Image (tube, helix red, strand yellow):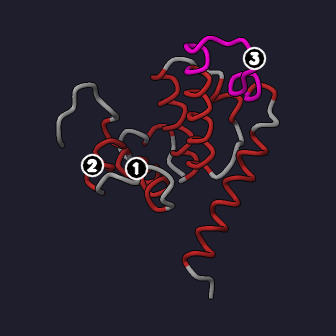
Amino acid sequence: MISNSQDNKSNINKIGEVIQEGLKNPVVKNICMHGKNKSSEEIKKIQSEFSRFVGYCILFKSSQDIEDYMLLSDKKDQIEFIKNKIAKEIGISKENIELKRKEIIQYAYQNFKKNGYVFHAANSASVEEKMTNGLKDGITNI
């Protein structure tokens, strides 16, 4: 039997391999890597895009279709892409996406929370609220 520590190490190694593979994609390289002489604003944008890339790899345990996702600049388009990809992953037809919204959110929540990659300092109710409604400016306490 594999211990939790070995299991976590295996998950981390797998995600590392997925990220390494995804970084070979020329679109990802262009968007997520920066050279010298970039302004701090440009570097922040690149860091944000890299975080988005890593989040995708964690969520799907794959970099398949990453190019299509990374080329989306509009947040609503990004969310729609992720929602449709999750639906496809768990066998929900496009016609039933809104009806099965909770299942889609649960998939995302389980893949982040279960594997302990993000939201380390938040309680489960807070994590689920953020996965459902997103982050909001000026939020005091949920």
Q: Amino acid at mark 3?
A: Lys
Disc 2 marks a residue whose amino acid type is Ser
| Magenta-highlighted residues | 28-44
Q: Residue at x 48, y 59 (%)?
A: 116
Q: Which mark is residue 36?
A: 3
Q: Amino acid at mark 1?
A: Phe
Q: Earlier in the sequence, mark 1 or mark 3?
A: 3
Q: Are marks 1 and 2 in contact (CB under 8 Å)?
A: yes
Screen quadrant of the C terminus? top left
Residue 72, image x, y percentages = 59, 21
Marks 1/2: CA–CA distance: 9 Å
Residue on which disc 1 sits: 119
Q: Mark 2 vs mark 3: which is more N-terminal? A: 3
Above or below — where is 57 with respect to 73? Answer: below
Disc 3 crowd rating (10 Å Cα; few below 14, some 14-19, many 20+) is few
Q: Label 2 belongs to which residue? A: 126
Q: Does residue 119 appear to the left or right of 49 in the view shown? A: left
